[in-house]
Image (spheres, rainbow, N blue to C red):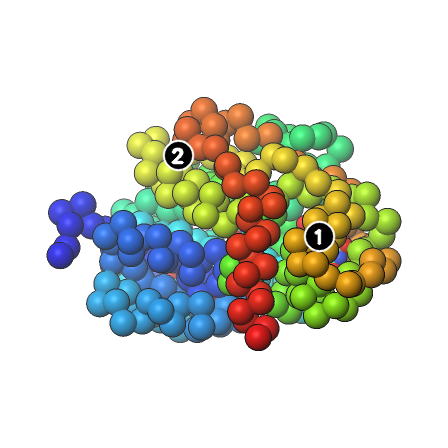
Amino acid sequence: MTLLTAKRILVTGGAGFLGSHLCERLLNDGHDVLCVDNYFTGNKNNILHLLDNPHFELMRHDITFPLYVEVDEIYNLACPASPIHYQHDPVQTTKTCVHGAINMLGLAKRVGAKIFQASTSEVYGDPNVHPQPESYWGHVNPTGTRSCYDEGKRCAETLFFDYYRQHKLRIKVGRIFNTYGPRMHPNDGRVVSNFIVQALQDQPITIYGDGSQTRSFCYVDNLIEAFVRLMDTDDGFLGPVNLGNPVEFTIRQLAEQVIALTGSRSELVHKPLPADDPLQRKPDITLARERLGWNPDVQLQDGLVKTIAYFKDLLS
Ligand code: NAD
Ligand code: UDP
Ligand code: UDP
């Protein structure tokens, strides 16, 4: 049955980790979903279970090229998110962030769609304000190996606000902090997937640096709830809004939790800290709590249990 409130929603990067969860959520809410992806880091397996749904449509397309479709809302998630992936072809990463944003904003302008941008905590760089509120302008290296992503995402935010001011587009910008959960890619290189895969295989757990650097980890279901709440706000624009779980852990604490929960015999080994690796990161989510009534309530331990179960199944 098609609901009267059903919308046609475009999700770019819909075959990726976050995108696949979002497509699933929007279909469950009764909407028609068009998933666009070039499969650079995404995977058809992530959305295989949705292909039989008549309200789901899949299109292979690179958003650095124009896209002409008719939709009511756009969630722009397309972009590799893990450092090893976004540094693999840095020019393409910047193009995806910048040309991709221009094309999706041009599309939103033509059809009058509301548009959400998946921005990132990386816009704060290696922050010297802690925790990070949205008003902090960041501390970003413009020419380093992470810059293609950090500066690309910063430029995308600029474009969103200029399309709002210049063309009166309805925009929503969420700055996403580290998020984890089922459907992360096992070779993604991100810390949660690396540690779980290593622990399940009794391989050494690779801590970069001394492990005292911090991150705050949000479980995927909590994050998707925030995306939908942000998109559903009435305001002409809202954002940037920090979206993340503010409970902060050191990387060493994360390794110890993963070992305890998997019962692994893995040892901890240390590897060099990558260039420009932020020493600390923790969102100030006052704005999201106030404007979205959002509370990321999944504790790290509970989220890790679900994520470990996913990887156990995948690796078996
Ligand atoms: P992911 O790599 O799993 O998903 C990204 C998807 O975008 C993939 O399916 C990939 O194939 C697709 N893609 C990449 N370039 C494309 C292009 N030019 N055209 C079409 N599709 C393209 O990553 P994710 O973790 O799901 O991240 C989704 C979004 O959220 C990204 O924009 C990322 O920057 C942002 N984000 C994620 C996190 C996190 O912790 N997961 C944190 C901050 C921001
Ligand atoms: N665009 C798109 N789909 C549309 C409309 C526009 O991909 O439905 C692209 C188009 O290629 C253009 C970009 O979005 O380059 C920006 O569009 P806008 O209308 O803002 O600018 P202009 O067309 O004047 O460059
Ligand atoms: N990290 C680590 N071991 C790994 C992968 C990552 O110690 O096997 C560290 C990394 O150096 C960083 C933190 O974990 O300090 C988070 O890394 P991730 O790539 O997941 O995300 P980001 O750096 O973008 O926050």
Q: In this view, does 284 lie above or below 230?
A: above
What residue do we see at 45% from left, 62% from top? 13
Q: What x and y, as percent, mark residue 52?
A: 27, 72
Which part of the image, by quadrant, shows the C terminus? bottom right
The kind of residue on which mark 2 rests is Phe
Q: Nearer the viewer, mark 2 or mark 1?
A: 1
Corner quadrant of residue 227:
top left
Residue pictured at 67% horizontal, 30% vertical: 131
Residue drawn at 34 percent across, 31 percent down? 235
Residue in the image at 25% along x and 53% along y = 31
Indicate the secondary structure of the residue bearing disc 1: helix
Q: Can you give x and y, in whole percent of width and height, for residue 47 in the image?
A: 40, 68
Q: In this view, does 194 lie to the left or right of 228?
A: right
Q: Mark 1 points at which residue?
A: 260
In terms of secondary structure, where does tag 2 sit? strand
Where's the N terminus, which quadrant?
bottom left
Q: Is residue 216 above or below residue 288?
A: below
* Whether residue 27 is situated above or below residue 121 in the rendered picture: below
Figure quadrant of residue 49: bottom left
User: Label 2, on which residue?
Assistant: 237
| Amino acid type shown at disc 1 | Ala
Q: x%, y% of residue 249?
A: 71, 40
Residues at badges 2 and 1 in contact (C-beta under 8 Å)? no
Task: Give me the C-alpha separation between circle 2 and circle 1.
Answer: 44 Å
Residue 117 visible in this rendered orientation of the protein: no
Mark 2 and ligand 2: say if the CB distance to the nearest ligand atom is below 8 Å. Answer: no
The picture places residue 216, in percent across and down from the top left corner, at: 64, 41
Q: Which of 113/24 is in front?
A: 24
Can the viewer see residue 150 in this picture?
yes
Label 2 Cα neighbours within 10 Å, binned few <14 / some 14-19 / many ≥20: many
